[in-house]
Image (cartoon, rainbow, N blue to C red):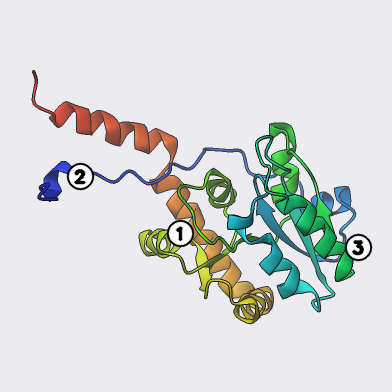
Amino acid sequence: MGIPATKVVLMPHPIPEIELPSESKGHYKKLFEVEGKQVLTVFGFLNSRKGYDLVLDAIKDLDDCVFLIAGGQHPNDKTGYVEQLMNKITEIKLAHRVKILGYIPESQITAVMGATDIILAPFRDMPGSGSLSLGVAYNKPIIGSDIDQMKELQSRGIGADIFRINKVGDLRDKIVSLLNNTRKQSELEQLSRSYAHEYSYRKTATRFCELYARLPKR
């Protein structure tokens, strides 16, 4: 469009500053009755672009995995996707390993994240994900699809492993590989910890102030 690059500034979605869980992971898993299980979580409102159906197919033969759907139906959603998802859970006999938690009040977010081993982001598109930023804030290892936005976040330092979008087998392999590799989990957690510090709301506000200060006075 002929716009000089100096006129364009990208501000990544900021990461909230939170208090990390104070209890053990086992404590939080007990709250959700998933003791001894590997907990995979997708956070936020349910919709088709987040790829919940992919997760169901990926974990159906992973008996040690539980899927937490940490959210509910959006009030304005008229697509029928949630009903389709619940029907699929029943059809492939996963009701005992999938928990739809519904809307999560802020007071319970810490417990959900405390019980989680891996945050999944099998998104088909991502205009800007506040739910993913929570996973980063809690320093969780992430497995995300290779959409452009996710690859950009990974290049900026987010602690994410990438699978090929809509490829159930690839997602399954990434889950199994990461669950069996505690060193890789720690590396991704550290990356998310560093990213959360670098792109906190506080630092983002400072960047905005610096940007405004450089603008010509009118």
Q: In the image, which disc is placed on residue 96?
A: 3
Q: In the image, which disc is placed on residue 63?
A: none
* Quadrant of res 210: top left
The secondary element bearing badge 2 is classed as loop
Q: Is residue 216 above or below residue 111?
A: above
Residues at marks 3 and 1, CA–CA distance in whole angstroms: 32 Å
Decide which of 218, 126 is in the foreground and name it: 126
Tell me, yes or no, whether the two marked residues, 3 and 1, touch with CB atoms within 8 Å.
no
- State left or right for residue 6 relative to residue 105: left
Q: Does residue 115 appear in this view?
A: no
In percent of width and height, residue 194 lies at 44, 54
Q: Which residue is mark 2?
A: 8
The secondary element bearing badge 1 is classed as loop
In percent of width and height, residue 64 lies at 83, 72
* Quadrant of res 13: top left
Three-letter amino acid code at the position of disc 1: Ile
Residue at x 53%, y 43% (from the top left corner): 130
Three-letter amino acid code at the position of disc 2: Val
Decide which of 213, 78 is in the foreground and name it: 78
Q: Does residue 99 appear in this view?
A: yes
Residues at marks 2 and 1, CA–CA distance in whole angstroms: 22 Å
- Crowding at dot 2, Cα within 10 Å, few <14 / some 14-19 / many 20+, comes out as few
Residue at x 73%, y 73% (from the top left corner): 57
Going from N to C along the chain, the mark reached first, 3 or 2, is 2
Q: How many marks?
A: 3
